[in-house]
């Protein structure tokens, strides 16, 4: 058991492993802890797909940076990483959402993204299992990609370990010791680690960890589900991701079949603080009924999915914020305590960029980008109430693809 570290990263999912690697690459002595195993909770249950055009310039910049880092992953880490850079399609079936498609193309081009409007015929050529007849507008981003989700954090953990990081699985944190408003140590079930710096990237358990220092992080773990069909003859791995904007559904190739996931209009929030300490994401109750309804809602676009045989049904607990942006911040009033959470069902694909930027902030004393839109204190006092926070986060989840602001 390591007894001292320059930094302790709590949570070995997508965010935590990326942060640990990038800190180790900067010469920091890092301990990466997880109460379970590396990439064992929500990360391997994700969809593993990217969308670089986001709702604001900072999120778009981080998403584009992350794709570039995945493209050169082997060069940066020395670890292999398989991915399919097949691009992605997004279509809208109503005039209102078509306007959003046009706006995303405009903003994407301004950011330097290879994104363009395409015809229905071109969309069908790229994804033969898509029937886009009802589409009002469609865009295509060539450099978007997808990958097996668990591969990314596992590769980052191996690379961090090779650089000297201590990767400690089955190591639950029981307390964070502070003195005079500064982090001093992390207490685990296996002993203490003296450290001046902690990064809370504990996913669904972020609030549990932060509350050890009296900090409140306004996030709500929210169940997200998907399924994968058995192989379908017309599906090929080089075909793109397809999103249907107005119903918050995505479909992509996977294992010779298709993966469908989406954002339920009445999602399930889970407070892990009320669950037994032994709870893990594998214990999360799943419900296929919402996925069935989402599949029926896109029957015209994906007739091949109607009645398809299901090979896998899985779900995780990504953390939602009220505005759909991550929380990446040094906690005010607590020296040496950082939070990286609020993945908003997009954390895995953006974790390479987040890890690099946060490690640079820690190492250099200031972030290389203006991260103020992701600060912990950006939310109003009304979200101090847990029920109002829950309602705001669930609304944001249910409108995940929409650029509408969360209602006051």
Image (cartoon, grey):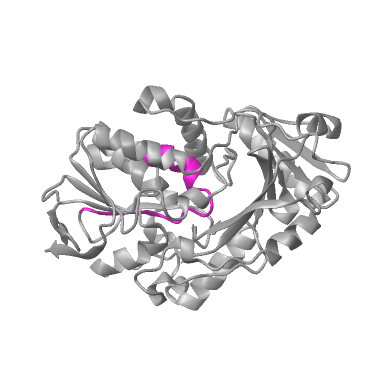
Whether residue 301 is visible, yes or no, is no
- Tell me: 365 left or right of 309: left
To which quarter of the image does residue 252 belong? top right
To which quarter of the image does residue 180 belong? bottom left
Residue 306 percent location from the top left of the image: 81, 53
Q: Which residues are magenta?
A: 336-355
Query: Does the segment drawn in magenta span residue 350?
Result: yes
- Tell me: 99 left or right of 115: right
Query: Does the segment drawn in magenta span residue 262?
Result: no
Q: Is residue 401 above or below residue 254?
A: below
Residue drawn 40% across the image and 42% down it: 153
Residue drawn 29% across the image and 42% down it: 20
Residue 263 percent location from the top left of the image: 64, 58
* Residue toward you, 395 or 169: 169
Whether residue 62 is visible, yes or no, is yes
Residue 64 percent location from the top left of the image: 52, 33
* Residue toward you, 339 or 4: 4
- Tell me: 279 left or right of 222: left
* Residue toward you, 108 or 20: 20
Give the quadrant of the C terminus.
bottom right
Residue drawn 42% across the image and 74% down it: 384
To which quarter of the image does residue 106 belong? top right
Residue 389 percent location from the top left of the image: 49, 71
Residue drawn 27% across the image and 59% down it: 332
- Tell me: 147 left or right of 23: right
């Amino acid at each position: 058991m390591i007894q001292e570290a320059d930094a302790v990263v709590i949570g070995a999912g997508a965010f935590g492993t990326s942060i640990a690697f990038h800190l180790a690459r900067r010469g920091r002595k890092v301990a990466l802890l997880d109460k379970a195993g590396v990439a064992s909770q929500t990360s391997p249950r994700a969809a593993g797909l990217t969308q670089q055009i986001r709702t604001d310039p900072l999120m778009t910049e981080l998403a584009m940076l992350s794709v570039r880092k995945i493209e050169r992953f082997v060069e940066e880490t020395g670890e292999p990483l398989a991915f399919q850079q097949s691009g992605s399609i997004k279509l809208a079936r109503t005039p209102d959402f078509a306007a959003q498609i046009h706006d995303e193309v405009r903003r994407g081009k301004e950011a330097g993204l290879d994104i363009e409007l395409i015809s229905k015929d071109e969309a069908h050529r790229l994804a033969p299992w898509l029937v886009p007849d009802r589409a009002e507008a469609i865009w295509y981003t060539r450099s978007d990609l997808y990958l097996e989700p668990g591969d990314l954090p596992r590769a980052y953990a191996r690379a961090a370990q090779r650089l000297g990081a201590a990767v400690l699985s089955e190591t639950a944190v029981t307390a964070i010791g502070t003195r005079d408003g500064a982090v001093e140590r992390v207490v685990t079930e296996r002993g203490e680690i003296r450290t001046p710096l902690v990064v809370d990237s504990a996913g669904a358990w972020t609030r549990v960890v932060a509350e050890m220092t009296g900090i409140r992080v306004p996030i709500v773990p929210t169940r997200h589900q998907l399924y994968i069909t058995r192989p379908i003859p017309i599906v090929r791995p080089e075909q793109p991701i397809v999103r249907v904007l107005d119903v918050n559904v995505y479909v992509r190739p996977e294992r010779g079949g298709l993966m469908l996931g989406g954002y339920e209009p009445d999602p399930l929030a889970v407070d892990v603080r009320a669950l037994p300490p032994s709870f893990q994401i594998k214990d999360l109750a799943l419900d296929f009924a919402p996925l069935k309804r989402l599949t029926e809602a896109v029957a015209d676009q994906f007739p091949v999915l109607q009645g398809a045989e299901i090979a896998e049904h899985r779900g995780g607990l990504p953390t939602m914020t009220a505005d759909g942006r991550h929380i990446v911040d040094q906690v005010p009033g607590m020296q040496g305590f950082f939070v990286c959470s609020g993945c908003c069902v997009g954390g895995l694909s953006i974790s390479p960029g987040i890890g690099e930027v946060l490690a640079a902030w820690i190492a250099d004393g200031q972030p290389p980008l203006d991260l103020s839109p992701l600060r912990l204190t950006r939310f109003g006092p009304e979200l101090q109430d847990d029920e109002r926070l829950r309602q705001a986060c669930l609304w944001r989840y249910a409108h995940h693809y929409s650029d509408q602001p969360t209602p006051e």
